[in-house]
Image: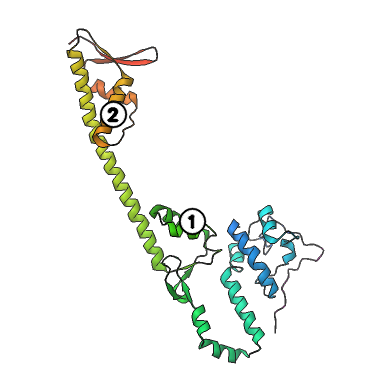
């Protein structure tokens, strides 16, 4: 016997939706409401299919969500939210399962006969074999998990970006894992997490190596700069004044030559290092310029 179409208890004269509540069940609960563009697309696709089969998973007057412009248009304009548990009831897997049940009913076979015939058919075997979207290998449905949270979707995107998995990024660039009804091996998700950690560790180690190399180059560059000041002053008759900006440029160029990197040091910090290295060096300002000069002639 075909199911009756389950509509909400709202009067046919009152089809308005309270957009502050869950747009699907219209119930007040303490559960946090959520929404995504992918969710709107999935609902717009699957609600009419459930309605056509007279198999809406929750009491719902579909006329509330369609004023003639289409469900997706109404949802996009009003930007409603919904309970994740309500949305899941309309996902692709449940829609396909309901469609299969509807097909079985239309065959007119008795439930007992139908179950026995399907259990030994290739059709059921094929339906129970799906692909893991991470490794693309087929596996029994019972061995896979279903992507059911936005948190998982965000986690996968972060991992894919870190490890630069372009294929996975492409899969996630259309709809989220919930809307796409994606399945995965738990071990594949763990492997992806481990790969992300390994890439992060390698990146951090490389960054630290670069910092160490630049710091070492900075020490050498500072020694060269101090020697330059001494030599220039020794070969001069009077006290030479050096522009701090010029010294900073010389210092950074030397670092680049030694480490193929750049130490962006604050000029005040460079001035303090020079004053610490050369005891009789003094710093003063002249207009907007900062100058350093020996206090006595050498």
| Mark 1 Cα-neighbour bin, 10 Å: few <14, some 14–19, many ≥20 | some
Give the mark toward the camera: 2 or 1: 2
Q: Position of residue 49 (x, y in %)?
A: 66, 71
C-alpha span from label 2 to label 1 = 42 Å
**What residue did someone put label 1 on?**
154
Colour mapping: rainbow
* Label 2 packing within 10 angstroms: few (<14), some (14-19), many (20+): some
Q: Residue at x 35, y 55 (%)?
A: 197
Residue 4 colored in magenta in the image: yes
- Up the image or down, 97 lies above or below 190; here it is below
Residue drawn 31% across and 44% down?
207
Q: Position of residue 107 (x, y in %)?
A: 65, 86
Query: Disc 2 designates what residue?
Result: 253
State whether residue 108 is above or below residue 283.
below
Query: In this image, 6 relative to 182: left or right?
Result: right
Residue sitting at the far top = 237
> Is residue 130 visible in the rendered structure shown here?
yes
Q: Which image quarter holds the N terminus? A: bottom right
- Between 47 and 121, the one nearer to me in the picture: 121
In terms of sequence position, does the residue under pointer 2 or pointer 1 come before the other?
A: 1
Q: Main secondary structure of the magenta part?
A: loop
State the image coordinates of residue 233 (x, y, percent, origin top left): 20, 14
246 relative to 58, above or below: above
Image quadrant of residue 24?
bottom right
- The local secondary structure at tag 2 comes to helix
Q: As drawn, is 3 to the left or to the right of 164?
A: right
* Along the line of sight, the residue nearer the viewer: 130 or 192: 130
Residue occupying image coordinates x 48% and y 74%: 130
């Amino acid at each position: 016997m075909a199911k009756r179409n389950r509509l909400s208890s709202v009067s046919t004269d009152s089809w308005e939706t309270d957009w502050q509540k869950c747009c699907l069940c219209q119930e007040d609960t303490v559960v946090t409401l959520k929404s995504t563009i992918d969710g709107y697309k999935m609902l717009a696709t699957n609600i009419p299919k459930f309605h056509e089969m007279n198999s809406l998973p929750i009491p719902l007057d579909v006329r509330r969500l369609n004023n003639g412009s289409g469900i997706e248009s109404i949802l996009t304009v009003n930007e409603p939210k919904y309970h994740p548990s309500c949305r899941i009831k309309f996902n692709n897997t449940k829609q396909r399962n309901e469609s299969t049940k509807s097909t079985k009913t239309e065959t007119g076979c008795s439930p007992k006969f139908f179950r026995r015939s399907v259990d030994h058919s290739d059709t059921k075997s094929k339906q129970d074999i799906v692909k893991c979207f991470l490794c693309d290998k087929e596996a029994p449905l019972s061995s896979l998990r279903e992507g059911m949270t936005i948190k998982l979707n965000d986690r996968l995107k972060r991992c894919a970006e870190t490890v630069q998995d372009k294929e996975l990024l492409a899969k996630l660039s259309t709809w989220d894992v919930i809307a796409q009804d994606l399945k995965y091996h738990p071990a594949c998700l763990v492997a992806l997490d481990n790969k992300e950690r390994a890439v992060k560790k390698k990146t951090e180690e490389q960054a630290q190596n670069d910092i160490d190399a630049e710091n070492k180059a900075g020490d050498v560059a500072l020694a060269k700069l101090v020697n330059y000041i001494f030599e220039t002053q020794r070969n001069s008759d009077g006290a030479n004044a050096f522009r701090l900006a010029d010294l900073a440029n010389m210092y950074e160029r030397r670092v680049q030559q030694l480490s193929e990197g750049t130490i962006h040091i604050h000029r005040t910090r460079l001035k303090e290092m020079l004053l610490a290295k050369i005891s009789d060096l003094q710093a003063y300002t002249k207009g907007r310029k900062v100058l350093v000069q020996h206090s006595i002639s050498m």
